[in-house]
Structures are given as structure tokens and as C-alpha cells.
Image (tube, helix red, strand yellow):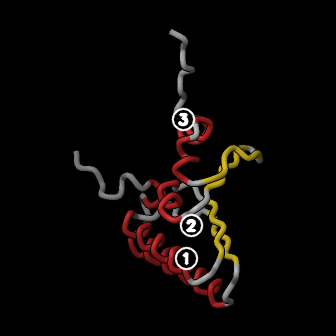
Amino acid sequence: MRRRADAHWPARQGQPAGRRAHAARAQAARARRALATRPRLLLLDEIAGGLTEHECRHLIGTIRAIHAAGTAIIWIEHVVQALVAVVDRLVVINFGRLLADGEPRRVMADPAVQDVYLGIRREPARDP
């Protein structure tokens, strides 16, 4: 049985190709409107969800350029690989409580973060 090319992108399954392109254009238009005001702070909420790898790489480049131009960015996102590719600081919140805060690689290596967000449970070390 042959799999659909977009089978690993559930948010896009069943959408006509034209509708996907329209959604991407609409998202880009919203971003242009927000940037037209030359904000000092830009709040991004779940903007990488449902993007293809190519779209995500483009998004990462765009966010880097916006930040390099002097705009501070607060980005709420569950697509962790996109966040880690861009940010200097990662803050993880679980049910409204601060779980971890710091350099992205250190935060992602935190056992509490891995347990809560990645489902990785580490067994406690045993004394010999």
C-alpha cells in the first residue's frame, strides 16, 4: 500500500493544495501587517504548527532576520526543533509553573523537561 506524501503532517491531510497555499499566504500577510508597525516586541503563538520542513526552515530564517533587525521576540511553540534552532533562551512552563529557564540545549537536557514534554522518564541512579 502506498502512503500519501503528506501522511506525517496530520494538520494538512484532506486539505486541497490550493487551500494550504492560501493558509500560508494568509499567515504571511498577518506577519507583514504586524511588522509594518515596526514593533519593538513581536509575540508569536504556535506559528510553526503544520508547516512542512521547507516552510519551517523558511520561517526560522525569517524569524532570525526579524530578530537581527532589532525586534525582541516572545515565541510560544510546541515545534521544539524550530525553537531550539532560533532562540538564545528557552523557558518551559508546565501548568503555569516555571519548569526550566536557560540555554536551549541545557533546558532540553533537563530531566524534568524530558519527563513532562518528551515523555522520557529516567530511572533513579542506584547505589552499587
Q: Position of residue 106 (x, y in %)?
A: 55, 47
Q: Position of residue 100 (x, y in %)?
A: 66, 46
Query: Which dot marks residue 101?
Result: none
Q: Position of residue 124 (x, y in %)?
A: 57, 20
Residue designated by label 3: 119
Query: Contact (CB < 8 A) between labels 2 and 1?
Result: yes
Question: In the image, is residue 111 above or below residue 122?
Answer: below
As drawn, is 10 to the left or to the right of 42?
left
| CA neighbours of label 1 inside 10 A, class few (<14), some (14 to 19), many (20+) | few
Return the disc, 2 or 1, that comes first in the chain's sequence.
1
Q: Position of residue 33 (x, y in %)?
A: 63, 86
Query: Which dot marks residue 47?
Result: 2
| CA neighbours of label 3 inside 10 A, class few (<14), some (14 to 19), many (20+) | few
Instruction: Name which quarter of the figure residue 27 lies in.
Output: bottom right
Residue designated by label 1: 27
Query: Contact (CB < 8 A) between labels 3 and 2?
Result: no
Residue in the foreground of this view, choosing between 80 and 26? 80
Q: Outermost residue toward the front?
A: 128
Return the disc, 3 or 2, that comes first in the chain's sequence.
2
Amino acid at circle 1: Gln
From mark 3 to mark 1, how far is it between C-alphas?
A: 31 Å
